Image (tube, rainbow, N blue to C red):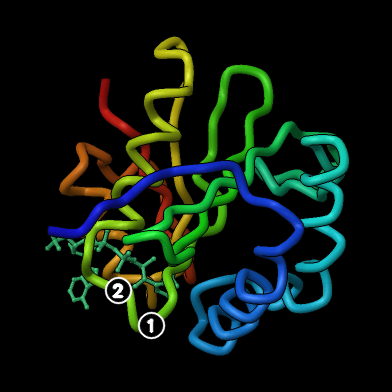
Amino acid sequence: MDEIIIRTGCKEDMPWVTQLLIDGVAGRHFNPTVNRQADGLLNEILRCGAFEMMKARHGTIYRTRVNARFDVAEINGEPASFLITLSEGRETELHLTGTKKQFRRRGCARRLAQHAIELANNQTRIFARCYRASSFAIDSLKKMGFVQDGEDKDTVELALKL
Ligand SMILES: CC(C)(COP(=O)(O)OP(=O)(O)OC[C@H]1O[C@@H](n2cnc3c(N)ncnc32)[C@H](O)[C@@H]1OP(=O)(O)O)[C@@H](O)C(=O)NCCC(=O)NCCS
């Protein structure tokens, strides 16, 4: 029986998380800008739990500072999966997630998402925006109670139905 624990990400996690982010861009799971932002993003989150980003919402693009969490799932003592969660105002976004190939399909990403949902105030809208290529992530979110709440050419937005 696998033992999965969730802990806060740390500096030592940066190399494998950065590699998963780069692989995820190649697999069309993340925006290509993640390639050059990965290091800076993780450093900023570790340093102060927040970072500045450009957000595209409701037809406008704006610069904003968002609070961010960086969590890691360990399976049987091995770091396996990460999740970066953003919160701004009354919204919580499951922003970037990935699991090392050898640990996939053992429940790590789901446990991380459940943990982020538990931490989010239930007054908050909890959502994720996934590229259409990320069908495993989309299916997983739907199983957890997320429903489609928007889409564009490349992405689908899902929100947790309260
Ligand atoms: C998506 C991803 C993070 C899932 O990580 P994981 O730790 O393997 O996920 P889990 O084991 O918690 O699986 C949760 C659910 O995801 C779906 N899923 C995950 N891997 C799957 C696979 N190989 N085939 C079909 N469904 C799959 C299933 O619905 C699964 O639930 P189930 O096992 O009860 O059927 C991982 O496949 C990954 O890193 N992919 C590349 C990056 C990516 O897609 N990130 C998400 C961007 S939005």
Q: Which amino acid does label 1 sit on?
A: Lys
Which residue lies most toward the left here?
1
| Residue 93, position as x, y percentages in the image | 54, 39
Residue where numbered disc 1 is placed: 101
Q: In which quarter of the image is the C terminus?
A: top left
Q: Quadrant of the N terminus?
A: bottom left
Q: How many numbered markers are drawn?
A: 2
Frontmost residue, 69 versus 61 = 69
**Residue sitting at x 80%, y 57%:** 41
Secondary structure type for disc 1: helix
Q: Place residue 52 in its image quadrant.
A: top right
Rendered view: 137 above or below 135? above
Mark 1: is the Cβ under 8 angstroms from ligand 1? Answer: yes
Rendered view: 149 above or below 90? below
Residue 104 is tagged as: 2
| Residue 147, position as x, y percentages in the image | 25, 41
Q: Residue 19 vs residue 36: left or right?
A: left
Q: Residue 70 vs residue 117: left or right?
A: right
Q: What residue type is labelled 2?
A: Arg
**Residue sitting at x 45%, y 34%:** 116
Mark 2: is the Cβ under 8 angstroms from ligand 1? Answer: yes
Which residue lies most toward the top here?
123
Asked if the residue under mark 2 is in contact with the one under mark 1, i.e. CB atoms within 8 Å, the reply is yes
Residue 158 is tagged as: none
Frontmost residue, 10 versus 119 = 10
Q: Place residue 80 in its image quadrant.
A: bottom left
| Residue 106, position as x, y percentages in the image | 22, 65
**Residue sitting at x 57%, y 77%:** 20
| Residue 137, position as x, y percentages in the image | 33, 62
Q: Judge the density around disc 1: few (<14), some (14-19), many (≥20) Cα neighbours within 10 Å.
A: few
Rendered view: 78 above or below 115? below
Q: Residue 118 vs residue 69: left or right?
A: left
